[in-house]
Amino acid sequence: MRSYLILGMCVLFLVQYFVEVKWLEFIVVGLSLVAFLGSAFKANRFPRWLGIIMMTAGIIIEWQKGTGVQGISDGIFLILPLICLLALAPLLSIPLRLSGFFHAIEVLLRNLMHQPKKLYAGITGTLFLLAPVLNLGSVRILNEFLEEIKLPSAMSAKSYLVGFSTAVLWSPYFASVSLVLHYLNISFKEYILFGMGLSLLSLVVGNLLFARWEKRHPLIEPLTPAAPLEKQHQKQLMKLVLFVFLLMGSCLVVENYTHWSMIVIVCLMSILVPALYGTVTNDWKRMVSPLMDFRDRTVPMLNNEIMLFMSAGMLAFAMKGTSAANGVSRFLSLLAHQSFILFALAVMVLVLCVTYIGIHQIAAVGALAMQLNPAELGVSNVSLGLLLLLTWSISTALSPFSGLNLMVSRFAGLSGVQTGLRANGLHLSILALIGIAIISFIG
């Protein structure tokens, strides 16, 4: 029942985006509140209470601003695109799984397991391709492939975090990119080359640092003997690369000609691509099982995400224009006029401190994206967006409360601090310094 409620909310939101009827907006907001309350009973203790606290604080702050029910409705409606993205994007895994791409990836990784450096490159490279489409599901899938091998904990922590965090910088299927570009009014085609370039740089730095680490911590025995990669698997991998680029290219083309919100485009693509796959292959029978699994397992499991995303978004919206937010904005503006590097470091430290105690990046980065004015700071919209997304990516890897860190910690058998700070602290520090230097040059 809750699945139909959440999916119905997503469909009605997409309809409202195009018809723009006010009464329909209130219905969508009402459904989202019911979904939020329903998720509260099913969510884990920490996200449940954190979500309730942030939602309550956001509503109280918005009410005190004098905007009343309309302001609260606007705050919830503003974050709904991300909830829809979160709920609908997993549909893209269905054609990927049925096409045999996952089996080809498994064969590739097993072929590289006798060479740690190449295996690390294979894991991070695979996540670079899969994570933009499958989100955290990509890490779960790769861990299933590698579970029997029992990789060293440090290697798992390094490869999973480095590979996945690159997608946070550039994928329109991620809440990070969609949110920041939406709030700063940046088109995806303006941003894509900068985001992709910085994520590739992160990948290169991560692989170089692992090669250095592996020399000091060599694996005593080869992980597994080498096996040839058959032509059919090579073709499947090439098709996977082509699929990802066609998917991103289609989003760019649609945005260029329609000027729709990229979040809406991505939600539509998440529905249309599986439907197109089923039509072209005429293999709807095989799709029934994964579609039912999506309805019965994937959507109902979004309790924690709905609690955190909706409440953090409401809090970020409510904070806009408050004396506290204005004070932070004035302080950061003062730093920006003195030194962009000081400004960038202050933004990073602020977000890292907030997220390290459990507050979601949407609240911290979202509030900054809505509050800061690039023109007043003396930087371009793209520069500010790139800085906020770089900060989001780093905080996702470092924060012991982020979904990525929690999942990788469980797989690697390490604590959140060990997974983030100890295993990847050097990589993230180098990426932050190089990123700030590049952004200062751009802006």
Image: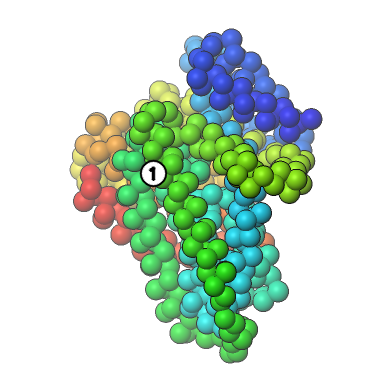
* Colouring scheme applied when the structure was drawn: rainbow
Count of marks placed on residues: 1
Residue at x-position 50% and y-position 44%: 174
Quadrant containing the N terminus is top right
Q: Can you say whether 393 is above or below 40 in the image?
A: below
Q: Can you say whether 348 is above or below 295 in the image?
A: below
Quadrant containing the C terminus is top left
Q: Can you say whether 84 is above or below 242 in the image?
A: above
Q: Name the residue under label 1.
A: 388
- Looking at the image, residue 301 sits to the left or right of residue 182; the answer is right
- Looking at the image, residue 195 sits to the left or right of residue 153; the answer is left
The amino acid pointed to by label 1 is: Leu
Q: Which quarter of the picture shows residue 49?
A: top right
The secondary structure type at the circle numbered 1 is helix
Q: Can you say whether 438 is above or below 186 in the image?
A: below
- Looking at the image, residue 97 sits to the left or right of residue 331; the answer is right
